[in-house]
């Protein structure tokens, strides 16, 4: 079989330790009969750091693209794709550990000509302490895994489930959609933006491949709530401005917004009760002691409540 050639694009800070770790992981990738390259788009890359990284010997072609500290991930990735020479682009993060068969799992999906992109699975590494929060992240109740079990992976996942940290795409498709929107610089929002533009064309599919596995040390619950707040405050307004049709699938539907239709009054009332302070804190307690299916639903409400709070704050801002 003839495999497509692949370029791995990694946008990161120029931390030598993190860079060497992800590059060593790339060296361990199974790639018999494959041709791939790695493009590191690095913020704050100095001549000294570049010299350190070039002292390591890798079996793949390695390129460095230097950007300043104000460059967001969307622009950094766009620059990385611009420097790539191969037909499939795979986006990774320096915080990931990747399974040896990752490249084959992504490339196998492109045998279907309708596959425009492939979204891989991200698990917790085995050494992470499995408290309630981390069990939620790695559970079959997690949204993407539950969707895959119910619907299969032969169709695009819901937009709000898309994660482009273990995500590949045909370079021609990426360029046809002008890559990432550089003005949408919150990671969750930029993921949704790209996925929406791809999936809006009926001939394109984002294939979910649960066996394309990467491992990542996830954020704590505190940090995850803060990121959800930022998504509501910074990301959702930009998405709604660009794509009003996304209103029904974003947390914005729980906020009274001028120019958008109301959801069911009963449903809005129910969600607003969950999103007020006392119930929110009660949910934090419920998720500690209740059965899994209840606990994980409470966690989803907690995260969504932070997005709603951020959007409400954005509406108050001048």
Image (spheres, rainbow, N blue to C red):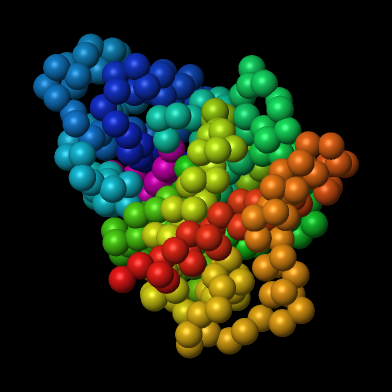
In the picture, which quadrant includes the N terminus?
Answer: top right
- Pick out the residue farthest to the right: 291
**Residue drawn at point x = 76 percent, y = 79 percent:** 266
As drawn, 68 above or below 283: above
Q: Is residue 258 above or below residue 217?
A: below
Q: Nearer the viewer, residue 260 or 28?
A: 260
- Judge whether residue 112 can be spotted in this image: no
Residue 18 found in image quarter: top left
Q: Of all residues shown, which one is farthest toward the front? A: 278
Q: Position of residue 132 (x, y in %)?
A: 73, 33
* Magenta stretch: includes residue 295: no
Left/right of residue 121 with respect to residue 36 in the rendered view:
right
- Residue 106 placement (x, y as % from top left): 54, 43
Q: Quadrant of residue 313?
A: bottom left
Q: In x, y percent, where is residue 23?
A: 38, 23
Residue at x 55% of width, y 45% of height: 225
Q: Quadrant of the C terminus?
A: bottom left
Q: Is residue 289 visible?
A: yes
Q: Is residue 86 magenta?
A: yes
Residue 108, by quadrant, is top right
Say which of 125 and 170 sits in front: 125
Side of 156 where 95 appears, left or right: left
Q: Residue at x 53, y 74 (%)?
A: 246
Horizontal arrangement in the rendering, residue 116 relative to residue 134 (left or right): left
Depth check: give the residue in front, 226 or 231. 226
Magenta residues span 84-92
Q: Residue at x 84, y 37 (%)?
A: 289
Q: How many marks?
A: 0
The spot of residue 96 in percent (x, y) is: 49, 30
């Amino acid at each position: 079989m003839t495999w497509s050639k692949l370029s791995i694009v990694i946008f990161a800070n120029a931390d030598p330790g993190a860079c060497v770790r992800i590059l060593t992981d790339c060296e361990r990738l199974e790639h018999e009969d494959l041709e791939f390259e790695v493009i590191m788009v690095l913020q704050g890359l100095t001549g000294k750091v570049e010299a350190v990284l070039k002292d390591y010997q890798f079996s793949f072609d390695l390129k460095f693209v230097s950007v300043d500290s104000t460059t967001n991930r969307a622009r950094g990735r766009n620059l990385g794709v611009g420097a790539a020479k191969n037909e499939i682009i795979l986006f990774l993060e320096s915080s990931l550990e990747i399974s040896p068969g990752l490249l084959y799992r992504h490339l196998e999906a492109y045998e279907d000509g309708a596959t425009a992109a492939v979204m891989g699975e991200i698990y917790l590494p085995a050494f992470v302490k499995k408290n309630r929060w981390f069990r939620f992240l790695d559970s079959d109740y997690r949204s993407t895994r539950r969707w895959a079990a119910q619907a299969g992976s032969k169709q695009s996942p819901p937009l709000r489930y898309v994660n482009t940290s273990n995500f590949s795409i045909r370079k021609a498709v990426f360029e046809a959609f002008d890559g990432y929107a550089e003005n949408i610089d919150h990671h969750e929002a930029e993921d949704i933006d790209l996925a929406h533009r791809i999936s809006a064309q009926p001939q394109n599919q984002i294939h979910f491949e649960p066996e394309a596995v990467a491992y990542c040390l996830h954020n704590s619950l505190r940090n995850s709530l803060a990121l959800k707040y930022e998504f509501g405050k910074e990301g959702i307004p930009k998405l709604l401005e660009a794509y009003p049709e996304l209103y029904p699938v974003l947390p914005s539907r729980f906020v009274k917004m001028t120019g958008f239709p109301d959801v069911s009054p009963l449903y809005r009332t129910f969600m607003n009760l969950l999103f007020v302070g006392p119930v929110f804190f009660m949910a934090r307690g419920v998720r500690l002691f209740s059965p899994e299916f209840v606990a994980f639903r409470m966690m989803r409400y907690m995260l969504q409540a932070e997005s709603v709070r951020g959007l409400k704050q954005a509406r108050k801002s001048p």
